[in-house]
Image (tube, helix red, strand yellow):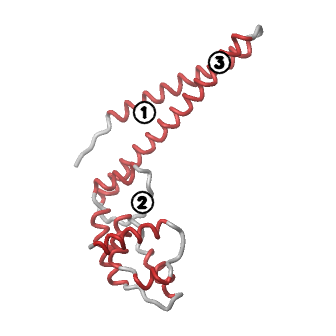
Amino acid sequence: MRYLNFALALTALSLTQCTSLSLEECRDNDWYATGLADGNRGVTATQLNQYQQDCREFNLRVDAAQWQQGYQQGLISYCLPENGYRVGLAGESYYGVCSNNQFVERYNQGHEQYLVNKRLAEIADRLNAIDSEISSINNKLNNLTDKAELLKQKNILLNEKNHLLDERRRLRQEDIRFEFRF
């Protein structure tokens, strides 16, 4: 069991890097565990072709049946509807590996929420920048006699800030109305 956990960790680590498999990885790989990890991550079945190509360079063969068995088992976990929501919410890509529509529906819901959250973060960042600019303008206003141009810049920033606050309020209200159905 300890070897299996190590193999899964090693496989996951090696697959996150865009490198080919080494001689040792091809020779010593637990192809079931590799397939399981790939299925759990929702990668496409074409990943097997890459392994085969990598190992062919060392005149080694991938145990495709073992990989496929592990891959199918991993997809069972990956394709659960609640995982679809998690994958979408994390902003991860979906490669069309699940045959059930519930996964896709939940992925789309999660992805929509991800986009809302991303926009809220962008708004928060811009609001902070606007507040900083307004503060800077206020400091300059206190030190200048000709304030007309700075007041104009300040009003433009205040208008943008109000627009962003309204958008953020609207996005948060839409979020409150978001409903889950299982």
Q: In this view, does 130 lie to the left or right of 1?
A: right
Q: Which residue is drawn at 52% across and 37% down?
A: 122
Q: Quadrant of residue 13?
A: bottom left
Front one among 15 and 1: 1
Q: Which numbered disc covers residue 161? A: none
Front one among 171 and 31: 31
- Tell me the quarter of the image containing the N terminus: bottom left
Q: Which amino acid does label 3 sit on?
A: Lys
Q: Is residue 38 above or below residue 178?
A: below
Work out which residue is located at the far right of the displayed protein and give it.
Answer: 146
Image position, residue 146 (x, y; %): 77, 10
Q: Which numbered disc covers residue 94? A: 2
Q: Is residue 119 above or below residue 150?
A: below
Q: Name the secondary structure under disc 2.
A: loop
Work out which residue is located at the far top of the displayed protein and give it.
Answer: 145
First-in-chain label (2 vs 3): 2
